[in-house]
Image: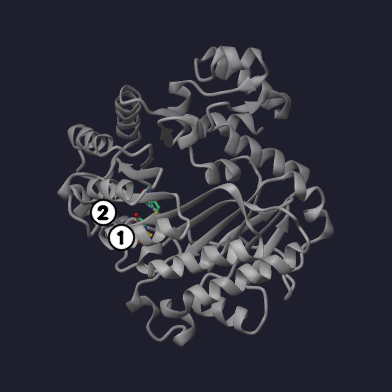
């Protein structure tokens, strides 16, 4: 969840949604994203809406404090219940992300999940994930999460090489993420993900191979591999501008992606979204699949985005302002937009083209359809799905996904 918020119309104080958003809701799955906006230190590349204790000092008083955070978030879950009314849907997925969720006590995360269970009920096979920083968990913490209903965990590994972790300002030591996977398995987690970043300045092909080797060797059932994005306004962007660290280029990113695909597929992982690989269909991240397929999700927490039935809204960014709104019984929503039919068409193409199954060709207009024909003959789309009416990327297409999608939305 990057930190910049769009403009939009105001959200009513009670958070009420237009009736159109709730029409047909029973037929759509519902997920919850719970944002935890705290980190021990800020990684130089990170643009997410998260705050260190120093950044928060004096800006939100006791309201912004992480000690009170679980209670505040539970208030938003109760608000969600009121806004969604007698919506009968049990929650299919819960994803706690950050920030660093595991800076909170395990009991706080379990309490937040408990509020969803009380207010909405969880589907019997609900997927319940938390992100975790490797240095912030131990076996007792993981056991408490597992006993409290979490069944999936995602560790931010990023790299196995010390010099790469240093450029990224990561505070864990090499080897710790792999140990976390073993601890999570021992605690009974069925599903474990490792996040990796490639293309960090100073990283070589061999460094990247070593990171993939270490990640695969740890035995997760899911790996996410992201090209490093140098976000404007971050410490990393400033260091690159000052010439202190070099910038990597797109060719390097493409080479690293091909290495990832080769090593992960050899190890039994299959891609199902451009940046995500899993060992089986059951190991895919259902929460992200709901998001990519335009289902309903409620994002609770500062700066979190929500989407219900074609209405998208986003919360105020600062934890102090967020807590103050809820303490006064107001929605923390900062703005919203009702998506037009055209917005939803474009959004579907942007998200679904990145999936293994791709996007239906009948969503494309004339120019987009002509672009799809060209992409097919250029080897960027796979012939078989195309013959069945879907635009689905080849390996080369995955390398150029952003460019392909730009042409298809025309
Ligand atoms: C926002 S983090 C939250 C999880 C946790 N705090 C952590 O860092 O491990 C989620 C993931 O986003 C990825 N990420 C964050 N900023 C990124 C950037 N600028 N470029 C590429 N990936 C990024 C990292 O792989 C990270 O694990
Ligand atoms: S720990 Fe994660 S969320 Fe926090 S600053 Fe680093 S990358 Fe961002």
Rendered image quadrant of residue 136: bottom left
- Which badge, 1 or 2, comes first in the chain's sequence? 1
Disc 1 under 8 Å from ligand 2? The reply is yes
Q: Secondary structure at mark 1?
A: loop
Q: Nearer the viewer, residue 315 or 242?
A: 315
- Using residue 234 as the reference point, say whether residue 15 is left or right of it: right
Point 19% across, 35% down: residue? 210
Residue 129: x, y in percent? 46, 52
Q: Secondary structure at mark 2?
A: loop
Check if mark 1's residue and mark 2's residue have beta carbons within 8 Å. Answer: yes
Residue 309: x, y in percent? 74, 51
Q: Is residue 362 above or below residue 10?
A: above
Picture quarter with the C terminus = top right
Disc 1 target residue: 43
Rendered image quadrant of residue 407: top right
Rendered image quadrant of residue 206: top left
């Amino acid at each position: 969840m990057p930190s910049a918020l769009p403009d939009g119309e105001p959200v009513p104080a009670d958070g009420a949604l237009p009736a159109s958003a709730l029409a047909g809701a029973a037929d759509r799955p519902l997920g919850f994203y719970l944002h935890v906006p705290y980190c021990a230190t800020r990684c130089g590349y990170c643009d997410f809406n998260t705050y260190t204790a120093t950044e928060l000092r004096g800006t939100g008083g006791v309201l912004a404090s992480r000690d009170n955070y679980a209670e505040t978030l539970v208030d938003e879950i109760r608000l969600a219940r009121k806004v969604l009314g007698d919506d009968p849907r049990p929650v299919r997925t819960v994803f706690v992300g950050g920030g660093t969720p595991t800076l909170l006590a395990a009991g706080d995360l379990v309490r937040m999940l408990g509020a969803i269970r009380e207010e909405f009920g969880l589907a019997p096979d609900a997927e319940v994930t938390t992100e975790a920083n490797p240095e912030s968990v131990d076996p007792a913490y993981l056991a408490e999460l597992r006993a409290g209903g979490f069944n999936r965990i995602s560790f931010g590994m990023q790299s196995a090489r010390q010099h790469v972790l240093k450029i990224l300002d990561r505070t864990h030591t090499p080897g710790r993420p792999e140990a976390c996977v073993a601890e999570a398995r021992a605690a009974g987690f069925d599903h474990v993900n490792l996040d990796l970043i490639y293309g960090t300045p100073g990283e070589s092909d061999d460094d990247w191979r070593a990171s993939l080797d270490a990640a695969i060797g740890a035995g997760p059932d899911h790996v996410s591999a992201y090209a490093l994005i140098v976000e404007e306004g971050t410490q990393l962007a400033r260091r690159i501008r000052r010439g202190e660290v070099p910038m990597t280029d797109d060719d390097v990113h493409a080479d690293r992606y091909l290495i990832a695909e080769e090593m992960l597929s050899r190890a039994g992982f299959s891609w199902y979204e451009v940046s995500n690989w899993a060992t089986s269909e059951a190991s895919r991240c259902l929460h992200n699949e709901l998001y990519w397929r335009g289902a309903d999700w409620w994002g609770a927490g500062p700066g979190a985005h929500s989407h219900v039935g074609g209405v998208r809204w986003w919360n105020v960014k600062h934890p102090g302002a967020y807590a103050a709104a809820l303490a006064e019984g107001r929605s923390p929503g900062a703005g919203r937009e009702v998506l037009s039919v055209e917005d939803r068409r474009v959004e579907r193409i942007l998200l679904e083209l990145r999936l293994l199954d791709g996007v239906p060709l009948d969503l494309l207009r004339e120019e987009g359809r002509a672009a799809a024909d060209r992409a097919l003959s250029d080897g960027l789309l796979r012939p078989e799905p195309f013959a069945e009416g879907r635009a689905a990327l080849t390996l080369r297409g995955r390398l150029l996904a952003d460019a392909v999608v730009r042409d298809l939305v025309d």
